[in-house]
Image (cartoon, grey):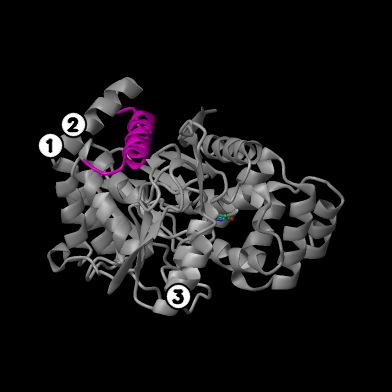
């Protein structure tokens, strides 16, 4: 069947067969189907959607466009977590060694910052010497020694997604549920995992702004994972305010280490423990969530999770003894009135941190690992006029001035009582 006939079928709202989807993705990956035909199909999918069977077929076709890790090369129960991305979301960094300390293997392929959301790889690279691109041998050795390894996507893993994601970005076809699901799940399934836990964010600082949209995405992700034989669970979580009290690469690494030291902000600790418990349960290492949670609490308290993190950093060439990068200047942003914090707008905070230089506005930009915000207040907390709402860490006075302008609108203080928001809204299973 010619590519234009398959585009026509989807354009007219018909279902593509498994073979048609495979042929199209194979052709797009090897260059025999050009970008313009893939763009037309993506737009047809955007308008017509895909059935659960078509979405699973697309996921498999994209996964098989490149290397799929042979699960037998990683002994033990393998589980990963994927977050749809948010401001201050550093959870993967304490979570992977925590879950490994409780007995599972975590082969985690992470991403770079996207738009205003920071990326796990960028955060890890603020550790002196940390290499996100390990050779295959180094990756398997790290998993063997530490139980976890956080690496970047290689050219060999899901090349179809790499090409298609860039194309969707410039053809207004990013916000399509089947395309998002196939993109996320193909990469995760290529890791050779037995189970996956998804953290689907919703709110001002997330990709999905409403609970309903986040639910639709979570359900589609879970259905696809399960249809591919992987135990898949999604947690729907709040992203109206940033996670934790820091946003910015090295500041978030320090907060992650605080969590592994059995300290750190309550929300980061709670979400790390909850995701860990669901990951451990999903690979049947514990009889129930409570037992898994208790085990994870012990691994934080006895230092075993921190120990694995330090070992993993070493296996990746990192050296924590050199200290983390620090910005040259700091300045507090002071509250203008006394009251309760009503809003800490994650979207504006993300933009301000991007302006400071912590993220990229173009793929070629270099990031400043030291800049960002610390000591962020949380919704529901009391502040007095003059108290710091956050502390800016910066290296460039002009950038700090611009960021401060944005930040003045990011915080709302009220004299009425404010109930702190829920962090975890619901759990979605098959
Ligand atoms: N993250 C991905 O990897 N792919 C998408 O399409 C959206 C978010």
- Residue 288 versus residue 173 in the image, above or below: above
Q: Nearer the viewer, residue 41 or 401?
A: 401
Give the residue displayed 29% in from the left and 28% down from the top: 293
- Report which residue position mark 3 lands on: 399
Q: What label sits on residue 298 in the rendered view?
A: 2
Q: Secondary structure at mark 2?
A: helix
Q: Disc 3 vs disc 1: which is toward the camera?
A: 3
**Do the residues under discs 3 and 1 have CB atoms within 8 angstroms?**
no
Q: Earlier in the sequence, mark 3 or mark 2?
A: 2
Tag 1–tag 2 contact (CB < 8 Å): yes
Q: Quadrant of residue 127?
A: bottom left
Question: What's the distance in space between the residues labelled 1 and 2, CA to CA?
Answer: 6 Å
Given residues 378 and 240, the one toward you in this image is: 378
Q: Which residues are magenta?
A: 263-285
Mark 1 Cα within 10 Å, few/some/many (few <14, many 20+)? few
Give the secondary structure at mark 3.
helix
Q: Residue at 51%, 29% (x, y): give it.
A: 426
| Res. 302 mark | 1
């Amino acid at each position: 069947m010619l590519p234009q006939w398959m585009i026509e079928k989807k354009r007219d709202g018909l279902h593509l067969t498994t073979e048609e989807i495979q042929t199209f993705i194979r052709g797009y990956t090897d260059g025999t189907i050009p970008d313009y035909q893939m763009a037309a199909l993506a737009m047809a999918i955007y308008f017509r959607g895909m059935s659960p069977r078509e979405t699973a077929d697309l996921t498999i076709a994209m996964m098989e466009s490149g290397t799929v890790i042979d699960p037998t090369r990683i002994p033990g129960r393998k589980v990963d977590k994927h977050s749809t991305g948010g401001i201050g979301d550093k959870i993967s960094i304490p979570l992977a060694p925590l879950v490994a300390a409780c007995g599972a293997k975590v082969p985690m392929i992470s991403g770079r910052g996207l738009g205003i959301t920071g990326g796990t790889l960028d955060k890890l690279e603020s550790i002196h010497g940390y290499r996100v691109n390990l050779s295959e041998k180094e990756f398997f050795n790290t998993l063997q020694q530490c139980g976890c390894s956080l690496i970047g996507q290689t050219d060999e893993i899901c090349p179809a997604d790499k090409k298609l994601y860039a194309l969707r970005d410039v053809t207004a076809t990013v916000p399509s549920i089947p395309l998002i699901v196939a993109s996320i799940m193909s990469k995760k399934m290529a890791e050779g995992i037995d189970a996956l836990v998804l953290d689907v964010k919703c709110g001002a600082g997330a990709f999905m702004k409403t609970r309903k949209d986040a639910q639709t995405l979570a359900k589609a992700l879970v259905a696809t994972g399960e249809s591919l034989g992987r135990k898949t669970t999604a947690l729907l979580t709040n992203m109206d305010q940033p996670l934790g009290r820091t946003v910015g690469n090295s500041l978030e690494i320090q907060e992650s280490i605080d969590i592994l030291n059995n300290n750190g902000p309550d929300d980061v600790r709670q979400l790390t423990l909850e995701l860990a418990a669901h990951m451990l349960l999903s690979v049947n290492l514990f009889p129930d969530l409570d037992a898994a949670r208790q085990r994870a609490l012990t691994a934080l308290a006895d230092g075993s999770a921190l120990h694995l993190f330090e070992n993993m950093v070493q296996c990746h060439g990192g050296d924590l003894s050199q200290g983390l990068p620090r910005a040259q200047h700091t300045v507090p942003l002071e509250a203008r009135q006394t009251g309760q914090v009503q809003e800490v707008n994650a979207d504006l905070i993300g933009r301000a941190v991007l302006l400071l230089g912590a993220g990229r506005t173009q793929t070629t930009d270099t990031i400043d690992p030291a800049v960002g915000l610390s000591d962020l207040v949380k919704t529901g907390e009391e502040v007095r006029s003059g108290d710091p709402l956050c502390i800016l860490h910066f290296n460039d006075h002009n950038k700090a001035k611009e960021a401060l302008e944005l930040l003045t609108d990011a915080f709302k203080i009220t004299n009425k009582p404010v109930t702190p928001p829920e962090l975890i809204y619901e759990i979605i299973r098959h």
